[in-house]
Image: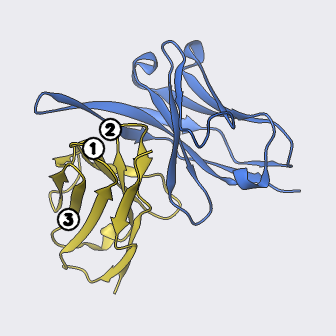
Amino acid sequence: DIQMTQSPSSLAASVGDRVTITCRASQIVSSHLNWYQQKPGKAPRLLVYAATRLHSGVPSRFSGSGSGTDFTLTISSLQPEDFATYYCQQSFSTWTFGQGTKVEIK
Amino acid sequence: EVQLVQSGAEVKKPGESLKISCKGSGYIFTTYWIGWVRQMPGKGLEWMGIIYPGDSDTRYSPSFQGQVTFSADKSLTTAYLQWSSLKASDTAVYYCARQGYFDSYGLEHDAFDLWGQGTMVTVSS
């Protein structure tokens, strides 16, 4: 299986901050990398597919970058509704998720 | 409305069997893979596998192979996840999700673009 490692596991930030979450794959997944947001008690929501493409309806403050094994999700200006847990997922081979990054209020 | 609606919460005893459901509507159910994702209490997401309702082709994660069974009923536009003998460690929320197809620079990419609301399964003696 391809292992996905996210960092950090959690972070505390303030509204308006720029937030960056990284995801590393244990082997090359090309650009087959997706990002999801999950709020407590809710189903996950697709934010970014193909490493860099914003899903329909996702605010432009979210962006994804990377290819190969190293990827980044950036929130340019954190909003109150962005406090949540974020997961990366590789769809290159037998899909796997990262362990998640919880974004909390500072 | 395009949606996936899952069956309600279940409380079972160890050793019992269980089948939960995921009903799709608002799109052509037989042309999209449906995936299952486990989330144990306070933990992250785990990809269990996928089923293609058009022909019931299934792919299981090695971690879940032999532990669960996926099935689908095209006429009911419903996918199922079942256990023959539950364990306490099966306690979790289970999500179904549609595997959407996206084109990016001429290459096909897949992602879970539509999710059910989740089914909480509690296994306790």
Whether callout 1 and callout 2 share a subunit is answered yes
Q: Tag 1: residue type?
A: Val
Badge 1: chain ID? A
Residue B65 at what x, y percent from top left?
62, 35
Residue B74 can be seen, yes or no: yes
Residue B1 can be seen, yes or no: no
Whether callout 1 and callout 3 share a subunit is answered yes
Q: Tag 3: residue type?
A: Thr
Q: Which residue in the structure is indicated by mark 2?
A: A92
The chain in yellow: A
Residue A8 at what x, y percent from top left?
34, 73
Which residue occupies the extreme left position in the image?
A: B105
What label sits on residue A29 in the rendered view?
Answer: 1
Viewer-proximal residue among A77 and B70? B70
Which of the 4 image quarters holds residue B16? top right
Residue A105 at what x, y percent from top left?
36, 82
Which of the 4 image quarters holds residue A21? bottom left
- In this image, B90 relative to B41: left or right? right
Viewer-proximal residue among A35 and B60? B60
Q: Is residue B109 above or below residue B92?
A: above
**Within 10 angstroms of label 3, few (less than 14), some, or many (20 or more) residues?**
some
Badge 3: chain ID? A
Separation of marks 3 and 2 at Cα, in angstroms: 22 Å
Q: Colour of chain B?
A: blue
Contact? badges 1 and 2 (CB < 8 Å): yes
Badge 2: chain ID? A
Q: Earlier in the sequence, mark 1 or mark 2?
A: 1
Give me the residue at 17% from left, 72% from top. A77
Badge nearest the viewer, 1 or 3: 1
SS at circle 2? loop
